[in-house]
Amino acid sequence: MTGFDIRSYHLPLKTRYRWAKGDHDSRMGLLVSAEIDGYIGWGEVAFGPHVVIDGAALSAETLRKVNAIDPASDDVLDQLDDAALHNRVRCGLATAALSAKAAAASQPLNQFLAARWMPHRQPAAAAPINGLVNKADPDEAIAQAKAYASHGMQTFKVKCGAEQATDLAVVTALRSAFPEAALRLDPNDAWKTVDNALERLTAFAPLGIDYVEDPLDTGVATLAQMAKLKESSPIAVAWDNPVDNVTAMQRLLDGDAVDVFVFKMPRTGGPDRQLEMIALAERAGKRGVLTGPLESAVGTMAGLHVVTCMQPPIPDCGFSLSAHFAADAAPLPPIVDGLQAIPASTGLGIDPSSYWATLPRIWS
């Protein structure tokens, strides 16, 4: 019997998740467990919220690929690479194996990770968090931001779309209500040309924007277009979708096309790969911001561990989305004064075993 197990989940949202690629009232994905000498590690496979997956089929296919892999082995990460897994699947398995190893070593996951990938750095005790504002109505957006501010958050990431007037009204209202807050914009590929993006960036610039994330359609934009926009933009340019490995990062650096890297660990393939990418951004003198793609508590907690391994001062990172869930895989530490603490317990630091037990077992 393999040391890995995988089960499909489907969790309801109490607050609709709105972004340029659709509106969502639930979240589906996979949870992963790994066992090492009785110690359990956890991970999550999180595709984009708009991606529909056959959870049972993907679980069974993955279990067949990793059936012979022992999470306790010293080269488990190399073996996962050899299995030719999708990056998001590898992320769940790698996180589960590493958190099981951390538990077996009587360490919190962030301490275990730092010892291997950031050996001269003591992880922070808590991660600073930004709030995600995704309401199209200015009053609703302000109410959403006020809810985040009540937990001490003073950085807001604002979802934008194709309607410039709507976005400008929301951001203007937020700036008026929160004159000292850091505002970040994320149109999620909705702005299609350099000229159109520059028009919008010029309109937003007087509102004091921290940075804009993926201000071009990254599915079709060329490196030259990205560089041209960065050179001309009155607002710092951040890239998210194109940033899935160190090679892609180096391409953006070599092309002088990036001010800020936005990281999502599921896309990059796991904590080990993510920490290597964070180290590259630090060497290049570029800011890196870690965010999550609407994950359950398992993926969120894994991301928080990695955030605390970043070079201080750690930028406010995007892990406030748990507020959307009507039910979750496990309780998370509360956000207090804008910070989410890492539990002192070993491994991942949360226990989703009760929820896990309700999920149907997949036989490979």
Image: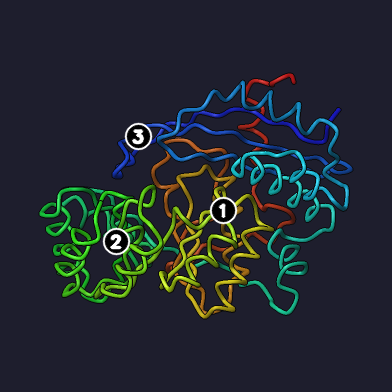
- Residue at (14% x, 64% y) in the render: 172
Q: Earlier in the sequence, mark 1 or mark 3?
A: 3
- The foreground one among 166 and 346 is 166
Q: Is residue 312 left or right of residue 5?
A: left
Q: Is residue 93 above or below residue 320?
A: above
Circle 3: residue type: His
The structure residue drawn at horizontal position 45% and vertical position 40%, both measured from the top left corner, is 48
The local secondary structure at tag 3 comes to: strand
Which amino acid type is shown beneath numbered disc 2? Answer: Leu
Determine which of the numbered discs, if any, sits on residue 185 in the image. 2
Residue contact at pointers 2 and 1, CB within 8 angstroms: no
* Tag 1 secondary structure: helix
Categorize mark 3 by other alpha carbons within 10 Å: few (<14), some (14-19), many (20+). some
Q: Is residue 135 left or right of residue 86?
A: left
Q: Which mark is first along the chain, 1 or 2?
A: 2
Q: CA distance from mark 2 to mark 1?
A: 20 Å
CB within 8 Å, label 2 to label 3: no
Split into 4 quadrants, where in the image is the C terminus? top right
How many numbered dots are placed on residues in this image?
A: 3
Taking depth in this image into account, of 353 and 115 the one nearest to the observer is: 115
Q: Is residue 334 above or below residue 362?
A: below
Question: Where does label 3 land, which residue?
Answer: 24
Label 2: state its secondary structure: strand
Residue that carries the numbered disc 1 in the rendered image: 265
Whether label 1 touches label 3, CB < 8 Å: no
Q: Nearer the viewer, residue 313 or 65?
A: 65
Taking the image as shown, residue 238 lies to the left or right of residue 7, namely left
Does 255 sit above or below residue 92?
A: below
